[in-house]
Image (cartoon, helix red, strand yellow):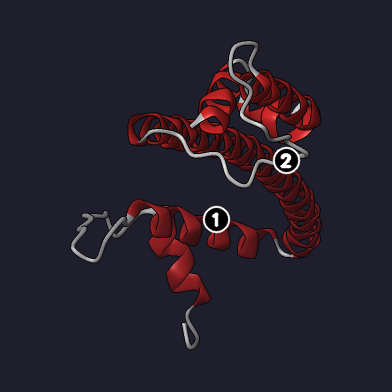
Amino acid sequence: RVVRNSFQQEVNKRTLKELLNTQREQLMADVKREVLEAVRGADKPWGMDVVDVRITRVDYADTITRSVYDRMEAERKRVANELRSTGFAEGEKIRAEADRQREIIVAEAYRNAQAVKGQGDAKAAAIYAEAFGRDPAFAQFYRNLDAYKASFGSKSDVMVIDQSSDFFKSMRSAAPGR
């Protein structure tokens, strides 16, 4: 009982970290000193000597153990939530960077496509100019076909045209056998 009481008093003076790391030897020395004082007592010595005292295990009351476990669990949850939020923020940063790079790539691709299209249009215009320069009547006929093609948006469109229009005149003159 004397040893147990001495241990309890000394353990209550220290933190768990101190008990397990820095002040373990000091704790045992203090307990040994208190037990020797009780055993050698001034009034009635017990007739024995205490050579050594050691800690084998430190148990806390169930309520203390439960509260320590709850604190540890809360700390782990806090760390987990912090890591999740950090991961979410990193994910958002990565997604934003990917979106930015995608926009740059799409813009560059559009620019390159427009340049190629412009080169093709220029080449087509040069070919048209050369072809139309050789035969102005064909050029007029081709432009009329394009105009009529553009005027029909769907299959159900209807157009009423005078037969004496320039289009029909060019069609009659281009028809074989006339």
The location of residue 23, given as percent across then percent down, is: 77, 26
- Residue farthest top in this picture: 42
**What residue do we see at 81% from left, 60% from top?**
130
Position of 157 relative to 49 (above/below): below
Sequence-first tag of 2 and 1: 2
Q: Nearer the viewer, residue 174 or 76?
A: 76
Q: Amino acid at mark 1?
A: Arg
**What residue do we see at 58% from left, 28% from top?**
7
Q: Which residue is mark 2?
A: 104
Q: Amino acid at mark 2?
A: Ile
Mark 2 or mark 1: which is in front?
2
Q: Nearer the viewer, residue 47 or 111?
A: 47
Q: Which residue is mark 1?
A: 143
Q: Nearer the viewer, residue 174 or 28?
A: 28
Judge from the rendering whether residue 143 lies leftward or rightward of residue 97; answer left or right: left
Judge from the rendering whether residue 164 lies leftward or rightward of residue 2; answer left or right: left
**What residue do we see at 63% from left, 16% from top?**
41
The location of residue 144, given as percent across then percent down, is: 48, 56
Q: Tell me the element at label 1.
A: helix
The location of residue 46, given as percent across then percent down, is: 61, 29
